[in-house]
Image (cartoon, grey):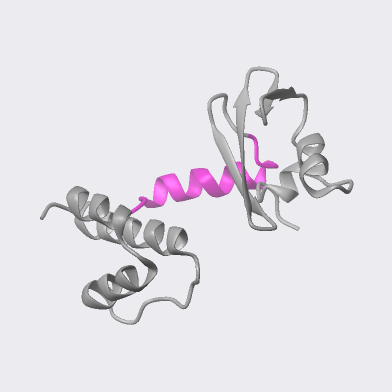
Amino acid sequence: MSPDEAAEALETMSLQELRQEWRTRFGAPPTLRSAELVRRSLAWLIQTSAFGGIDQTLRRQLRGQAARGGEVSDGARIIREWQGQRHEVEKVEGGYLYAGRRWKSLSGIATAISGTQRNGPKFFGLRES
């Protein structure tokens, strides 16, 4: 089975099956309770084992982007899980799209999600604490 086929096969597995697959391939699985998180992590490991991971140049570029305050390019998707709900924001020219509405800043979106004033880049993990 190819790495892509193996990653696709994970889509229909239960949490217990995912943990067993992890044990078979990589040893002790994480104690995560989210099947989706285990599924994504396992797919990442399968694909990076076969094709390689992120090279050092790209790692440095990504770290540099975070150090500059999390500037993101148009078309980028920013995902945050908050109180059990997944929130997805898309960067578009001049702002962001979230929940079918255009926003000028991530801070406005973070405040809408959390119900309290928040620093948007910090809330979405684009800036260190």
Q: Position of residue 86 (x, y in %)?
A: 60, 48
Number of numbered tags placed on the structure image: 0
Q: Residue at x 80, y 49 (%)?
A: 114
Q: Position of residue 125 (x, y in %)?
A: 66, 51
Observer-nearest residue: 112 or 49? 112
Check if residue 63 falls in the magenta segment: yes
Q: Is residue 10 left or right of residue 94?
A: left
Observer-nearest residue: 81 or 56? 81
Q: Quadrant of residue 49?
A: bottom left
Q: Is residue 108 left or right of residue 63?
A: right
Q: Quadrant of residue 104?
A: top right
Observer-nearest residue: 30 or 12? 12
Check if residue 84 falls in the magenta segment: no
Q: Position of residue 73 (x, y in %)?
A: 57, 28
Q: Residue at x 32, y 56 (%)?
A: 43
Q: Main secondary structure of the magenta part?
A: helix
Q: Residue at x 53, y 26 (%)?
A: 75
Q: Quadrant of the C terminus?
A: bottom right
**Furthest residue toward left:** 1
Q: Position of residue 117 (x, y in %)?
A: 89, 46
**Furthest residue toward bottom:** 28
Does 124 appear above or below 25?
Answer: above
**Furthest residue toward right:** 117
Q: Is residue 13 left or right of residue 60?
A: left
Write the start and end of the magenta stretch as one range.
53-71
Q: Quadrant of the N terminus?
A: bottom left
Does 75 appear above or below 51?
Answer: above
Q: Residue at x 30, y 55 (%)?
A: 12
Does 95 appear above or below 121?
Answer: above
